[in-house]
Amino acid sequence: MDPVQVLQYILSGITSGAVYAVVGIGFDIVYSATGIINFAQGDFLMLGGMIAVSLAPHMPLSLAVFCAVAATGCVGVLLHVVFIRWLRSPAVLRLIILTIGLSILLREAALHVWDEKVRALPFFSGDETSSLAVLGARVSPQVLWVLAVAALIVAGLGLFFRLTLTGKAMRACASNASAARLCGVDASALVTLSFFLSAALGALAGCAVSPITQTSYDMGTPLAVKGFTCAVLGGLGSPTAAVAAGLLVGLVESFSVSVLPLAFKDVASLCILLAILVLRPQGLFAGGSRSLKGGNR
């Protein structure tokens, strides 16, 4: 394998890994606040991309993306309020089945609204024929947008959780919900906010990747599996670790194409998920945030 091809695989793996990391961060945000594994997280990327594609012909692309992110965030809030918030200390298995059902609901709704056609947003800059040379490898300008969006999400979340009162309150609730309530924190409202954030960030990533991978109604499930792999690999409740795990999964998946047929590309991430669940279920970095319990949902 020549160095240029290796670099091409690395760039491809980093791009895919950045998207997987954002999905994993969405898992971590909701898990830290509620203890729920939200398997509808991948469908938020699909929903954001589809809404933006529908709006783009009628308004500037930046405004279409903004509206898609806001609308998808509201969908996340709606799912929480209608299907989850009223539950009182439900079993983990019940929550898993519920979020899988919500994923199916979103997928079928998207099928009826947008049908089976594959759609894509226009490139944020340049077009499909544009490419940049990086040490002999070719990179689409949209790849830089994907990496920039992922970096912005990670940095923005870090600043939000460390510098804002709301972010600090969310961290306090994740650490000790009862103590946070005694200090006057509205844990229920923060849980709802966590669903909005996870859905909105997923939608933003879905818009950024749409020009490269295109968007279809059924793209959410494989993204959810890979995002969950990143969340588990990094340690549930640790968004920072999910970033490193996402890049690792993306690189492994990218290089697996050199030894496996393209149709088996997803096998790599599934093998990582199975291995980590068997060998180190707490993830590579133990000690993630504690979840809120019972009434916070």
Image (tube, grey):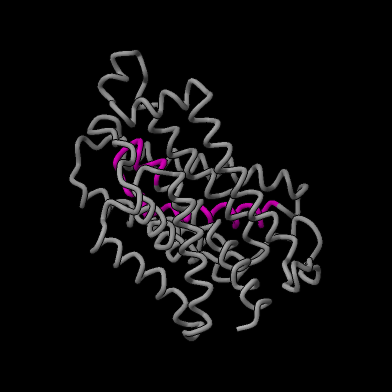
Residue 20 picture location, percent across and down: 49, 58
Residue under the point 65% across and 73% down: 8
Q: In the figure, 196 relative to 55: above or below?
A: above
Q: In the figure, 147 relative to 74: above or below?
A: below
Residue 249 picture location, percent across and down: 46, 64
Farthest front residue? Answer: 3
- Res 269 quadrant in image: bottom left
Residue under the point 47% across and 23% down: 166
Residue 126 picture location, percent across and down: 81, 61
Viewer-nearest residue: 69 or 223: 223
Image quadrant in which the C terminus is located: top left
Q: How many tags in the picture?
A: 0
Q: In this view, does 78 lie to the left or right of 213?
A: left
The reply to whether residue 46 is visible in this rendering is no
Residue 171 picture location, percent across and down: 39, 29
User: Does the segment drawn in magenta span residue 40?
Assistant: yes
Q: In this view, does 235 lie to the left or right of 57?
A: left
User: Does the segment drawn in magenta span residue 95?
Assistant: no
Residue under the point 59% across and 64% down: 215
The residue stretch that appears in magenta: 28-55
The reply to whether residue 218 is visible in this rendering is yes
Characterize the magenta stretch by its predominant secondary structure.
Answer: helix
Farthest top residue? Answer: 183
Image quadrant in which the N terminus is located: bottom right
Q: In the figure, 186 relative to 160: above or below?
A: above
